[in-house]
Amino acid sequence: MMKFRFRRQGTDPQRERIKQELFAFNKTVGHGFPHQPSALAFDPKLQLMAIGTKSGAIKIYGAPGVEFTGIHGDATAVTQIHFLPGQGRLLSLLDDNTIHLWELVAGPSREVGGHFVVRIFSLWEKIKLCLFVSFIHSRLPDDYRCGKSLGPVESLQEHPQQPGKILIGYSRGLVVLWDLGAGRVEQLFLGKQQLESLVWERSGNLFVSSHNDGGYSVWAVTSGNACSPQPVSSTIPYGPFPCKAINKILWRTSQSGSPVLLYSGGMPRASYGDRHCLTVQQDKEHVTLDFTSRVIDFFTVHSIKPEKEFDDPSALVVLLEEELVVIDLQTPGWPSLPTPYLAPLHSSAITCSCHIANVPPKLWERLINAGKAQRGRQQTHMSWPICGGKNLAPPPKQQELLLTGHEDGTVRFWDASGVALTPLYKLGTANVFHTDCDDPHDPGDDPDLQQEEEWPPFRKVGCFDPYSDDPRLGIQKMSLCKYSNKLMVAGTAGQVIVLGFNDERSDHSVDVSVVDLLQDREGFTWKGHSRLEPRLKPAPFPPGFQPLVLVQCLPPASVTAVALHTEWNLIAFGTSHGFGLFDYHRRNSVLARCTLHPNDSLAMEGPLSRVKSLKKSLRQSFRRIRKSRVSGKKRVITTPTSKVQEANAALAEQEEVAPVQRRIEPRSADDSLSGVVRCLCFADTFLRDGTHHGPTLWAGTNSGSVYAYALEVPGVGSGRACERGGASESSSCVEAVLGKEIQLMHRAPVVSICVLDGRGKPLPDPYEASQDLAIAPDMTNAHSVLIASEEQLKVFSLPKVSAKTKFKLTAHEGCRVRKVALVLFSSAAQEDYNEHTLVCLTNLGDMHLFNIPALRPQVRYDCIRKEDISGIASCVFSKNGQGFYLISPSEYERFSLSAKVLTEPLCSVQLDRPQMLPVVSDGEGQTLEPPSSLSSPILDTPLDSPLSCADLTLDSTGELTVEDVRDFLT
Amino acid sequence: MSFDQHVFCFVQFEAEYRRFGLKRNGSGGFQEFYRLLQTIHHIHGVDVLLGYADIHGDLLPINNDENFYKAVSSANPLLRIIITKREDEPVVYGTNSLQRRKKGLGLTGLRTTGSGTIHSKSKSGLMIGPPQNFRQISSIIDVDILPETHRRVRLHKHGTKKPLGFYIRDGVSVRVTPQGVEKVPGVFISRLVRGGLAESTGLLAVNDEILEVNGIDVAGKSLDQVTDMMVANSHNLIVTVKPANQRNNVVHRESKNFMGNSGSVGSAGSTGSVLSHESPSPASQSNPITASSSIAEGDSEDEDDDGDIILENDCPTAYNPHLVTKRNSVKLNGESSCSGPHPSAVGRPLPQSMSLPSSIGASLGYSSNTMSGHNGSLASSSQDSMKDDGTELTL
């Protein structure tokens, strides 16, 4: 009853105000590469690039730091986007045949987007299309007509010099130059091959068409000639054997003479039909850029000033399905440029991540240098070509580092201080081991080596590499000490590597230690993967983090928890079988403890457990079938009859699916995988008695067990080690003594353990206290330990472990704890006021904040959709109240829980916007006058055949509805 | 044959009795006596426990030489020995335990003083040790404040090896509202496991709708959330259900007619809604007191429940195959004497069950296997072995 009354209280206005000054939830910015991009556009006047995705998002990028995001209300794929150059407006065509008009709107501090929707093409345009189709038909020569329709319009291109003229390309090959002003056909070009795309030459005297057969044709525009039956020239670059279509072609003139021709596709069908290629050729120079993922679209950055005679392209920007590649066209050899944003986070799948705030400048500088050395030859002198907008964000107050571990055994270091996540340095761990492909080659590193004497002249570009050489190399856990520059990484095959930073290249062999975590436990056989073979010979290690020691856990199960204490030179690591403690300074194993429950057979089977995986995969495949059936039905065009059918089908489906049931049983000791070590932590605290503190190691398992070990570290700490003095020095090795074993009654997995000092604050990191970088912990009052399990948060007093406070989250809310972090929140109003808070992410994707050590709930925010399991699993917190989670395999969403610490784009774009569109007040269904002349090419009407367009009923002709005004979220 | 040198043994094993004489000083040790009894009763190979009645009428164990000699020396000259199978329900040793036993098994022939019996009753709350033959496994609570269509059931999981034994599923609940019949998603019991705790209570049934878990309304919560809440509360689970079968409801309102309106405040408040049986409303809505009272109860109860076990070691223990049993025994002790506000959780349920309405008397199942393997001798021996390991218990 008492407790209940306590919980009710909390509407203290003073406290509420402080809470508001401390906590605020914002999703600030997305990092990485948009998932499944589907459209690309570039505004040469404003120097802005827009990317549309299959999920209906539009992202606009300018100079580094200039970013805008908008999301269409319904998640349909964006098929095309076009800027209205210089106006800060863009049109998007969606898969559901709607056109949306977006505009950048200046707010007091950030840009907000206005958003208009056109349900269907405006009437004016339709009429014209209908008109001239019949008109054209009548004018075609009889032998060309052959009684066939012209096919859909593939391309519409506006004349570069005369705005009233457009070039219309029909699928069958016919190209028409249409004069909008006069409303008549100016010239007909009788193409014979199926058309893919059209592009004007700068002067407007030529245009180039690309075709289905892998060829392109150059056509001359001559006034007075009504019909040109033949192109000027026609080439199939990769012939003579059948080639794939050239999807898009660009023709850019240059001062040096011959034009630059850029086109995607056109590869010989038989030998290279599966490659994703883009060809750049100028005169004799010819490069076939070979990408690892599909080319979505590309454009060139070139001069658009009318007084200039040539295009002089400076850069080629290629949007691929998985990354953005920029080629410097001014530097000979056309090298690729590193991108300052849109980093392909997922070049190999992300397996774990870790955030380090407030990185010391020394380490920062060394990392940047190591990264520069890595890129080496790749470097070009060109600055980033897309430079629209102005970044108004103040320079970051501190350097932040985001580490991502990948499936291929690499660890990537990202600069997470600002809005753009930029790569700093990449660390590979594969060279510690013997792998199948022993020489570590990176396609991006050595472009010269790749250039073989072959035709087509392929050049591998881009770093997206989804294929892992060996899944055992995958990184599972990482820990970095920013003061001593020691890094600990642990992987899928039980490998734990300690690395130190070295500015010089070094050839050395890595010490290997094997730790048996089973401890002669009988009756278990490991059926999972074997361990990785360490390389015995000295290997060359480039500047950066270089491996010192390799500790191999046996059985080689995936490492599930790590802890690093650089002051004591200790690492701790845990797997599904137990945990170990290793002294990397003296290179000896201190402790190995098996946590297996005798009944647990599953743990031994390893990740490839046949019984379970078969069952699981069957279930999954059934689910997939069901899902695909459902989504297939959705795509049916909605007519009244189909709607009825749909409803019936939905009903039938509901009935056929048996209700899911859940077993209600307390967790028992012999649940499978109960021995998995979930968390490890080092702390200098009171374990033996209330007067002597010393190093301790804490480990928590999946079955709610917590083991606490008292450590004797020579030369460290107070207490007994000092009293004994010489004795411990002579033995000079670390010892671990089991001090406490706690079995949580509810047996839920222990998610995190943290020791709090006498003031109830978390203990500082290693070196922070001794180097005066943090307030020294209070060692005079009694310490306590915070144990967070999936179901409860609990604080125990130390050294006598008795429960002080607790919060039963699952019992009250029905959600389970997934991630916890202790975060220091600073007040937005008072300069020096801050509070340590426990942030807790649950399986429902919401954030619960608790004060410590009282564990009073403070606020709750919905953050991640509860269905987004990988998003919840990938969430990582920073120490100052921000966090990251994956919204797709390639994108991190950055969020902030703090009212003070926010990293969000602050930028401005100089617009030259004609006021022909009415300013949206709040009215609905405002009709809008469409632009009287085409200022941007509009391609591809969504109609199958222009002849059929008259049949379509236009229920909302030319009507613009205002759907949502605050859609640009950033 | 003098009484000084001989002991008359009166041995009872289940329904069989044997009498024989024994030399007071000539007899060997405990093992020899144990074998002798096995021969006499023809129960070779059966694992049994021996106990004797001392001069005060207490049932004391014989399991080593020392207490065997003590038993022999205490015989006057009759030595009453009781043999029980080890698999049977645990024998409760201790002060006046024989009297209690007598009540249960109808054993006669022992001299008991009236004062002794009274004494035992008054002292029963203080007994520390494994629980008695009967233990409470479930109860209906808050009958006075709940609508008649609802039932609040408390399942006492602690100590039993029985699984809770039920499954829940999603479903559609039909509610009667002023606007008409409304369909809302609900959570229902989908299956009861044979022999499980839930089935043995008879208070829960398939298709009962779950309205609350430990005082928290489950409306709007997903099946997984409700599952997690139940699992988190599984040691002391209080579920409020709307039984699918509404015929067996506790109809305490009928007594209202002749008892006058002396009912609780809660019942008076909810009379209106209760009169219409078929308009179910979540208990927490119809009566705010309900939720609070059950939370309070739940919380105070699981201060005991949550006694996490803390072992203090001075040296790392090697793996021990007996670890599991050791843990269990430790847990029991931890439960009974942890630092919660109610020092004896085990002793408490009994007086509670006394006050239960007679209608659910049947629900008091008899859990025969409750404490198997946790009788006194085992517990003490495991404690001994722990001391050998250098392990001490902080309790």
Image (spheres, coloured by chain):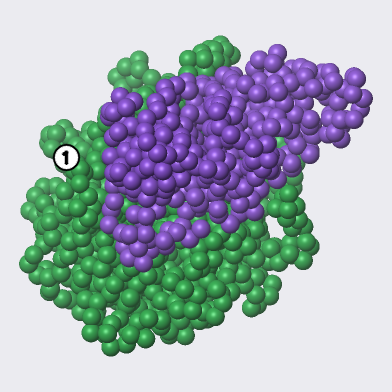
Q: Nearer the viewer, residue B304 or A781?
A: B304
- Where is residue B207, by image quadrant? top right
Dot 1: few (<14), some (14–19), or many (≥20) neighbours within 10 Å? some
Q: Which residue shows up at 23% across the image and 80% down it?
A: A731
**Chain letter of the residue beneath label 1 in the structure image:** A
Q: Which residue shows up at 54% across the image and 66% down it?
A: A797
Instruction: Determine whether, in the image, residue A950 is placed left or right of residue A230.
Output: right
Q: Which residue shows up at 58% across the image and 46% down it?
A: B127
From the image, which quarter does the C terminus of chain A lie in?
Answer: bottom right
Please provide percent x and percent y for residue A162: 47, 48
Q: Which residue is mark 1?
A: A272
Q: Which residue is the extreme one toward the right? A: B260
Please provide percent x and percent y for residue B238: 63, 35
B383 over B105 or under it: above or below? below
Rendered colour, chain B: purple
Q: Nearer the viewer, residue A181 or A356?
A: A356
Which chain appears green? A
Please provide percent x and percent y for residue B142: 74, 33
Q: Is residue B77 visible?
A: yes
A13 over A542 or under it: above or below? above
Q: Which residue shows up at 19% across the image and 37% down it?
A: A273
Q: Which residue is the extreme one toward the bottom? A: A726
- Where is residue B216, by image quadrant? top right
Name the residue type under label 1.
Tyr
- Where is residue A354, by image quadrant? bottom left
